[in-house]
Image (cartoon, helix red, strand yellow):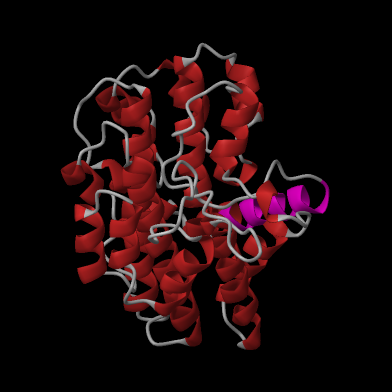
Amino acid sequence: MEYLTYGYMIDNVALLITGTLHERDTRELLERCHPLGYFETMPALCVATNIEELYNSVLIETPLAPYFKGSLSHQDLDELNIEIIRNTLYKNYLEDFHNWVNNDRELGGTPTAEIMTEVLEFEADRRSINITLNSFGTELSKQDRRKLYPSFGKLYPEGVLMLSRADDPEGVRIAVDGVHDYRSFFDQTGMGGQGGGGGVGNMSGGAGDEGKSLEDLFYQKEMEISKLAFTYQFTHAVVYAWVKLREQVRYSTPPSMMTWATIANTCLFPTGDTKCNMDSRVHCSKPEGQDRQLHKRVLNASQSSRSANGVSACCRYHS
């Protein structure tokens, strides 16, 4: 259950630091943080001035601490470095989650592991593709970009290597050509094709038969995988899948799809950089009503589990 909250914690960290750089009110920032990603020392993020201070004074006592250690340099916090931090944390988080579901003695080889492996491999591939596309025209070097790719997935290792060398959308299309779903997505959007003219910034795609963007197609695939989780009985994966489906239930049109961090940043920084959130991950807007009750139940379940065992999630999974 704790792993379900880590992605939201990472988004909250990035949101608070970015908001602080733009001199936004701390209370306003905290109100826009995702409730599933809340942790006790979160308000103190607003006073961090460099990565070392951010880790030592705030994050060392959170489940995110292992994802920081040994993977980030001691640099000042600016917008590019914050995006690198966020995507590095996501990379480490996904690799840890994937390793746990496949190697845990109770989960390894179970239907839960099978479903979650498919879910996480798709998320890893999507992040690798989106990061590559959104890095074009930025200061992010190919070497630094490659460090942000998760080391698993259907594209790993050959496709990931080709993505790290790509210079344009056509190079990305060639890199994913070996995976039918991804090749089909690029064909439908016209991205990278000889006649395609789709935008790259947030994968707006070309004018396909149905006018769908690359992110729309990623969204649909994520929903298909989540729905298929319910065809299995007695698996923990249905909790993860239900949360993902519930997040999207109030949206009837794909253009509404945005990451939690993207939505918050849009509200806070309406004239901000369009290259923000280079991974362009799909999440919903601020939870209300039944969704907020769901978030509270998940948080309460996580806290009860930690209290019953007498150890933190960090110690339990990363010791």
Residue with the most extreme top position = 23
Q: Specify the quadrant of the image occupied by residue 76.
A: top left
Image quarter in which the C terminus is found: bottom left
Whether residue 49 sits left or right of residue 147 in the image: it is right
Name which residue lies at 40% across and 47% down: 63
- Where 131 falls versus 53 (above or below)? below
Whether residue 15 sits left or right of residue 267 in the image: it is left
Q: Foreground residue, 191 or 123?
A: 191
Across and down, in percent, residue 182 comes to: 43, 70
Q: Foreground residue, 40 or 70?
A: 70
Across and down, in percent, residue 251 comes to: 75, 54
Residue with the most extreme front position = 195
**Total marks placed:** 0
Image quarter in which the N terminus is found: bottom right
| Magenta stretch in the rendered image | 289-302
Residue with the most extreme right position = 289
Name which residue lies at 44% across and 68% down: 122
